[in-house]
Amino acid sequence: MIRVPLRPLAQVIAARSQGLNPDIVEAERRAAVLRNRRSEERRRAEWRLWLLSGVFLLAFSAVGGKMAVISASAPTETRRAVAGEPIRAHRADIVDRNGVLLATNMVTSAIYVETRQMVDFVGVAEGLASIFPDLDAETLLEKFERPGNFHWIRSEISPEQQQAVHELGQPGVYFGPRETRIYPQGQRIGHILGGSRYEVQAARAAELEGVAGIEYQFDDRLGDPEQIDTPLRLSIDMQVQNATRDVLQSQMDAYGAIGAAAIVMDATNGEVVSMVSLPDFDPNDRPAPQGPDGDLLFSRASQGVYELGSTFKAFAAANAMERGVAGPNTIIDTRGPLTWGRFRIRDYHNYGPELTLTEVMVKSSNIGSARVALQTGTPAQQDFLRELGFFDASPVELPEARNADPLLPPRWSELSTITISYGHGLAATPLHLATAYASVVNGGLRVHPTLLAGATPPTEEDRVVSRETSQALNQMLRAVVSRGTASFANIEGYEVGGKTGTADKPNVGGYAEDSVIATFAGMFPSSNPRYVVVVSLDEPETFAAGAIRRTAGWTAAPTMGMLVTRIAPILGMRPQPEVLVENVPATTLASAGQ
């Protein structure tokens, strides 16, 4: 028996009093309760449905937004050599002073194998050996059979080689993305840029590192992620560099020299506009230091320490004038030979009993230069050469040059003072010589050599000689070219001035009889020097005027003349009428010293 719940008596009485059927009233009440319950359940269901739809909408929006960001950005990936050390896969460009590209990066690939994925060791070895002739199939096979799953094959391959490897169709051979360093100017600037190599490598990236030259000196700057898009701008002018190298190579070949160097420097601020050393090398294929071509890495311009001959007479004259010992027309005793102990100093020719200081320079008298240096004194000579930078390695931004210390006499005797006055007994680099000449001809302000564009000109705090001394020296150097030993360097319209220097090469127990280093150091225009040029030829030789000639007047001076003819128009300099300046009044050595 089923018990039916009784309706409340109050509801029944109320319904009957209104003339209604209590059963119908109860049914309607239950129907209303049911409708309310269903309405509430519908509202709950609709709310849950909207909430779930919102969640899905947000999720799909996030995924879509991320996909849009990824598709619009450059692909990146985490690159690590070891935990916590990111690999710097990019490197800033290097350009010359005019924006010409000197070093940049090119996308390439490396190739490696994972032996666990390989199915045919012999096929892979033979296939790779056929694509890369320098690889041996047997050697590769031995590598594949060694312990370990990962083996490098090559750090760089060309697109053609990559396609050929693809066509092998061998599993287990993979490519890793790389950025290789290329040098569009090749060997024409090898000694300056130095070169780079892969230092840290991983399957998906590799880090380039400078090994020499500018690449090594500014390794942190070139690899700095914040400066990747800012090229490093050098002071080098590639048009001048190309012209300098072409002239130097042709003259080196013409004179049969075994080496040569040339430097063009802005005399106003020490910027190196061009620096060439021959023979040179291509930084795209840098030779190994210990290999058969390792000698090519040596820069004669910034590393070669040589005796520079009579080019040093300019410093003896400038020092004497600056200290009031002599003037351009001071009479100098040139009677010879000059005897010091068992040593005798002679001139190349007999120039008579006396010459003016200017004529000592013009005729390149060793005796005259020696007597001026003795009158000036050893301490004064030491101080002056120290001020010009001959006591320390060159501060130029080349790590190799920082190790090229000048060779000074172990005991600076009076004989050292004599021989150094005409360029023997002290050895330095051509870069030292160019820097010193720039400092004494530019008005007397010491400059510091630099390979970076935008150098700051020196100030009065950097003065090494007075403006008057500098001007007088420039007139002397101009006379050397216009009517002296460097006449072959005289180019009409450019007022070339300078001094020749011929130094015997050191040999076992002394000096070689027929091997010299011929040097010319000069500037143009002499009335207001803008550029200093140093040219050096190692063991030059030419047949002229019925005899074999090795001196700088016959070899380095003509090279200077050809060089000025080539580079002056590139530097924006046009031939100008020569400005003649009167010499200071003549005086005697004795009276000038008072």
Image: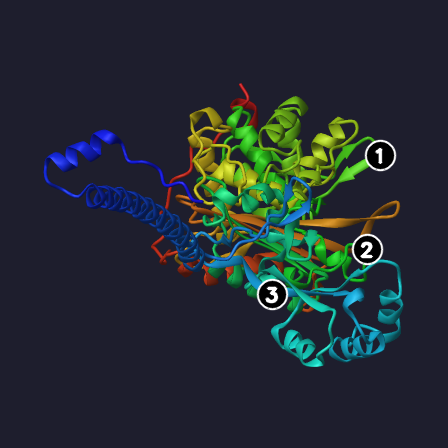
How far separated are the C-alphas under marks 1 and 3?
Answer: 68 Å
Q: Is mark 2 on a helix, strand or loop?
A: loop
How far separated are the C-alphas under marks 2 and 3?
Answer: 28 Å
Compared to 376, does 309 lie above or below? below
Q: Where is residue 34 in the image (x, y as percent from the top left)?
A: 29, 45
User: Given this view, does label 2 or label 3 mark the residue nearer the observer?
Assistant: 3
**Residue situated in front as seen by the camera: 550 or 273:** 273
Q: Residue at x 10, y 37 (%)?
A: 18
Single out the residue that lies furthest toward the front: 1
Disc marking residue 108: 3
Answer with mark 1 or mark 3, whichever residue precedes in sequence.
Answer: 3
Disc marking residue 290: 2
User: Given this view, does label 1 or label 2 mark the residue nearer the observer?
Assistant: 2
Q: What element carries label 3?
A: strand
Residue 334 visible in the picture: no
Q: Few, some or many C-alpha atoms within 10 Å of disc 1 (few <14, some 14-19, many ≥20)?
A: few
